[in-house]
Amino acid sequence: MKRNIVIAVVTAAALVGGGTATALAVAGDDDDSTSVTRTDDNRDDRGEDRSDDRDGDDDDGAVRAAAPGDVTAAEAITAALKHTPGTAVSAELDDGSWEVDVLAEGDTWHTVRIAPDSGKVLGAQKDDEDDAAEVRAALKGASVTAEDAAKAAAAKGTVVSVDLDDDGGDKGWEAETRASGGDARDWNVDPKTASVTPDRDDD
């Protein structure tokens, strides 16, 4: 009678950044067959490869997630105005890029998108806005630009938006900042003195 000997050797290796565990099973019988089974930690429970997930990039090359980058709000406004001259009325970090609204000559509106990591212009489009008269009235006598307001508010945290409030009696700049812990705060920036005060409506 022949004897069947089964020897199981399991070797686990943990690699930094996603290890790989490999199991070897050696069975000794009449034909001394050997089988090798590989288990890759880069596959999930469904057997799909997860190696690309660690890179944080989508297959379609989507723009990076919205977050304060190397380009400040003031720098984004400067880049937008260099591309599309006019009066910057707002700037917001949205959908992974800065969106700067510019009121150009002839009361035409443009939205200019700026890359938050390089300051390059990603695109620009003409918008159909009809409140040019209200904006120009709100800015009459103002010496503080959107860029100035963004710089002033930067003393309170990372500016993620700046916008002209042209409604009501308290016309001026509004800015939103994010602290290092992620807390958001709203501020009012005086259009003549650039003084920054907490927004009374900020909860």
Image (tube, rainbow, N blue to C red):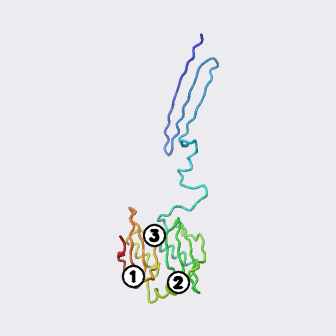
Considering only vertical position in the picture, is 107 above or below 2? Answer: below
Distance between the Cα atoms at labels 1 and 3? 18 Å
**Residue 160, numbered label:** 3
Q: Looking at this view, name the residue that lies furthest to the right.
A: 31
Which quadrant of the structure image shows residue 86? Answer: bottom right
Q: How crowded is mark 2: few (under 14 residues within 10 Å), some or many (20 or more)?
A: few
Residue drawn 54% across the image and 52% down it: 55
Q: Are marks 2 and 1 in contact (CB under 8 Å)?
A: no
Q: Looking at this view, name the residue that lies furthest to the bottom.
A: 141
Residue drawn 42% across the image and 77% down it: 174
Give the residue at mark 2.
Answer: 131
Which quadrant of the structure image shows residue 181? Answer: bottom left
Name which of mark 1 and mark 3 comes first in the sequence: 3
Given the image, on which type of amino acid does mark 2 rest? Answer: Asp
Distance between the Cα atoms at labels 2 and 3? 24 Å
70 vs 202, left or right, is right
Given the image, on which type of amino acid does mark 1 rest? Answer: Asp
183 vs 35, left or right, is left
Q: Residues within 10 Å of mark 1 (few under 14, many from 20)?
A: many
Give the residue at mark 1.
Answer: 190
